[in-house]
Image: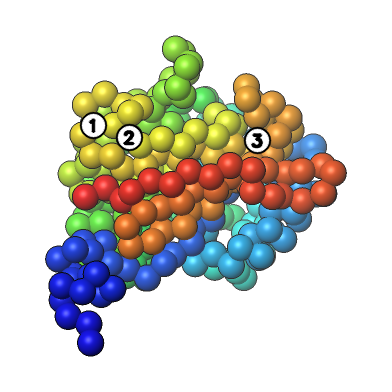
Amino acid sequence: MNTPSDPARPTSHARPHATERRRIVHVSDLHFGSEGVEERAEAVLATTAALRPDVIAVSGDLTKRARPEQFRAARRFLDRLEAHAPVVVVPGNHDVPLQPFVRFRSRLARYRRYVHPDPQPFFTDGHVALAGLDTTRAFAIDGGRARRAGLARLAERLADLPTHAYRVVVAHHPFARTPGLRLGAVVQRADRALAAFEAVAVDAVLWGHRHETVVAPADTLARGVSRAFLLVQAGTATTRRGRRSERGQNTFMALDVAARDVTVTRLAYDDAASGFAADATWTFARPA
Ligand SMILES: [Fe+2]
Ligand SMILES: [Fe+2]
């Protein structure tokens, strides 16, 4: 018979993160309207179906130039993605039209119409929670900003979860620099955002924008952070604009959340196999 001291049956005291396993697929920077995207998107859908995720994060830059036909193509893709699992999607800088009048009047009007009425959606099943944070700006073509109101809303939503729930933020812009790169802007008010994430015990932050994969605990990449929550920067899933170490490559991510640890897998497109396959994995203990 198992007793509370039996190692085969750890006590709840020994399992602060007791939870059912969950798989999150993280796709970014689709850029519908760019060359070759539709074809690659078919491969993303096929691999996502095979992975059988519990929830899917799409971290912005759905379109090339925020044109209606590009949003319609993105919408068709999201409809098919949603057949596999709930999707939490946020806008990227490319989803804001370039025309000044449109930008300043209502930068996310088209995004709201075609993608989702709420640019900061929220999903939870009690074991995993994904909170979207809109980092787009009307006054910057490329850069982003973590606004106080968005952070407050996110904190409110994550505060009421059971302690074992794995808390994930989904945003478009980076909150930390890429290791080895001295330049490369982070989102404005990144420090404020990281402190807010730490205060509500966030476990992982997913973003894109740079078209190159980075996976690291926050305390190794950002100053002033003591909680080792995970930072995941996904590459571009579908465009030919992969950068630096991922030049010409297409990648996306899968996170397997278990009671004590999280395994992050990068899926990379393999031309010879005409499909995505795992080419790197990282495993991290969940932060206390
Ligand atoms: Fe992008
Ligand atoms: Fe971007």
N-terminal-most mark, 1 or 3: 3
Q: Vertical placement of 245 versus 43: above or below?
A: above
N-terminal-most mark, 1 or 2: 2
Is 127 on the left or on the right of 267, as rendered?
left
**Residue at 37% across / 31% down in the picture?**
175
Question: According to the image, label 2 marks what residue?
Answer: 218
User: Toward the viewer: 123 or 126?
Assistant: 126
Is 188 on the left or on the right of 117, as rendered?
left
Q: Nearer the viewer, mark 2 or mark 3?
A: 2
Label 1, label 3: how many angstroms apart (C-alpha)?
35 Å
**Callout 1 touching callout 3 (CB < 8 Å):** no
Amino acid type at image mark 2: Ala
Amino acid type at image mark 1: Val
Q: Position of residue 273 (x, y in %)?
A: 82, 49
Amino acid type at image mark 3: Arg
Question: According to the image, label 3 marks what residue?
Answer: 65
Label 2, label 3: how many angstroms apart (C-alpha)?
32 Å
Q: Is mark 2 within 8 Å of ligand 2?
A: no
Query: Residue extending furthest top?
Result: 182
User: Toward the viewer: 174 or 97?
Assistant: 174
Q: Nearer the viewer, mark 1 or mark 3?
A: 1
Question: According to the image, label 1 marks what residue?
Answer: 225
Dot 2: within a 10 Å radius of its alpha carbon, few (fewer than 14), some, or many (20 or more) residues? many
Dot 3: within a 10 Å radius of its alpha carbon, few (fewer than 14), some, or many (20 or more) residues? many
Determine if residue 240 is in view. yes
N-terminal-most mark, 2 or 3: 3
**Residue at 21% across / 74% down in the picture?**
6
**Residue at 44% across / 12% down in the picture?**
182
Determine if residue 61 is in view. no
Is 43 on the left or on the right of 79, as rendered?
right
Q: Is mark 3 within 8 Å of ligand 1?
A: no
